Image (cartoon, rainbow, N blue to C red):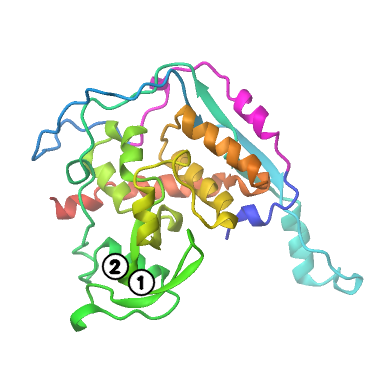
């Protein structure tokens, strides 16, 4: 259940003040990545060093340490319902406070944004779609996401339960429906290269591989129309937003949530684009909250799943 839809009149500061609010002068080293670099990881290829590194004199992170406590409202009831057991329970629930993180509250780091020393290589740094040998299926992560997101039962190619053929998918980027898996690609909401440049370069291989195959949060991997996925590439919101405009606020919200969960950096161009579009599309501040309970649960799942890719090493 998404608490953002229950918060109703939850109030936050203006978007402009959120950017200026995050003016804490901290060093990037104070916030470690999800997992420190593991020097023991073997690598099969040596990527070329960066010669034209992007340079930003400052960067942002969603401030997941700043937690607000908000009341959850309950729907209006008629006088005859006021004493019913269910309403009494809702009344108790309404008086409870829910701890939430405001995704519009960012920390500003007045230091050069850390960047990798070697160029991104998908297979080397993040591996491939994983076929988990412990789940008694022959489906890899792509197939599992297609099964998860299809509104109808799927069919499989060649009569084997491995490769998904047909189903019914709603593409959130175009708001169109597709019935063939050939029209669908699995989009990493925050693309792998973007994650790599935003801090994942400092992770060990097993953390990056888990990120590439992570199904612990539906918004992390998206069944999207193939052309849109290719158009997006590794772009952030400064370079790509879905053509379906009513979905853009949710898109930016999901982007920020994933960057927060995985402690990924936000560069100034990315931050400015999100700020501008949140204002342009009148996004509701109440939708840009993430419960502390859900954040803790995501971090726990990640920590418990770090060896997921090691059962099927490249």
Q: Which residue is mark 2?
A: 143
Residue 150: % across, % down: 41, 73
Residue 74: % across, % down: 76, 60
Secondary structure under the numbered disc 2 in the rendered image: helix
Is residue 210 visible to the viewer in this orientation of the structure? yes
- Tags 2 and 1 in contact by the CB under 8 Å rule? yes
Q: Residues within 10 Å of mark 2 (few under 14, many from 20)?
A: many
Q: In the shown orientation, is residue 90 left or right of residue 151?
A: right
Q: In the shown orientation, is residue 80 left or right of residue 117?
A: right
Instruction: Based on the picture, tell me whether residue 15 belongs to the magenta stretch.
Output: yes
User: Relative to the observer, which residue lies in front, 159 or 136?
Assistant: 159
* 10 relative to 171, above or below: above
Secondary structure under the numbered disc 1 in the rendered image: helix
Instruction: Based on the picture, tell me whether residue 156 belongs to the magenta stretch.
Output: no
Q: Which residue lies at the image location 39% right of the left edge and 69% below the top edge?
A: 148
- The quadrant in which the N terminus is found is bottom right
Residue 76: % across, % down: 83, 64
User: Relative to the observer, which residue lies in front, 173 or 307?
Assistant: 173
Image quadrant of residue 125? top left
* 173 relative to 84, above or below: above
Image quadrant of residue 186? bottom left
Q: Residues within 10 Å of mark 1 (few under 14, many from 20)?
A: many
Q: Which residue lies at the image location 9% right of the left edge and 38% below the top edge?
A: 45
Q: Which residue lies at the image location 55% right of the left edge and 30% below the top edge?
A: 106
Residue 283: % across, % down: 65, 47
Q: Which mark is residue 147?
A: 1
Q: Which range of residues does the magenta coloring cover?
A: 11-34
Residues under labels 2 and 1: Cα distance? 6 Å
Q: Which residue lies at the image location 28% right of the left edge and 74% below the top edge?
A: 164
Image quadrant of residue 143? bottom left
């Amino acid at each position: 259940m998404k608490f953002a839809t229950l918060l109703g009149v939850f109030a936050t500061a203006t978007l402009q003040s959120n950017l200026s609010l995050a003016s804490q002068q901290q060093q990037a080293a104070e916030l470690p990545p999800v997992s420190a670099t593991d020097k023991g990881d073997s690598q099969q290829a040596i990527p070329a060093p960066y010669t034209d590194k992007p340079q930003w004199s400052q960067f942002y992170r969603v401030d997941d340490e700043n937690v607000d406590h908000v009341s959850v409202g309950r729907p209006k009831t008629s006088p005859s319902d006021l004493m019913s057991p269910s309403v009494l329970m809702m009344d108790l629930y309404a008086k409870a406070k829910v701890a939430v993180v405001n995704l519009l509250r960012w920390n500003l780091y007045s230091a050069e944004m850390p960047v990798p020393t070697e160029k991104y290589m998908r297979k080397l740094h993040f591996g491939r779609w994983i076929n988990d040998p412990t789940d008694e299926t022959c489906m890899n992560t792509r197939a599992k996401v297609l099964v998860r997101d299809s509104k109808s039962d799927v069919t499989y190619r060649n009569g084997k339960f491995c490769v998904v053929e047909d189903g019914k998918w709603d593409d959130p980027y175009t708001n169109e429906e597709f019935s063939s898996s050939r029209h669908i690609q699995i989009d990493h909401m925050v693309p792998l290269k973007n994650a790599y440049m935003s801090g994942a370069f400092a992770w060990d291989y097993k953390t990056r591989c888990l990120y590439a195959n992570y199904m612990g949060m539906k918004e992390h991997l998206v069944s999207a129309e193939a052309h849109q996925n290719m158009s997006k590439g590794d772009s952030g919101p400064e370079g790509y937003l879905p053509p379906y405009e009513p979905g853009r606020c949710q898109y930016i919200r999901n982007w920020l949530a994933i960057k927060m969960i995985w402690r990924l950096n936000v560069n100034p161009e990315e931050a400015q684009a999100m700020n501008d579009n949140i204002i342009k599309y009148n996004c509701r501040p109440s939708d840009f909250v993430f419960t502390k309970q859900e954040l803790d649960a995501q971090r726990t799942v990640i920590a418990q799943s770090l060896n997921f890719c090691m059962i099927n090493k490249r």
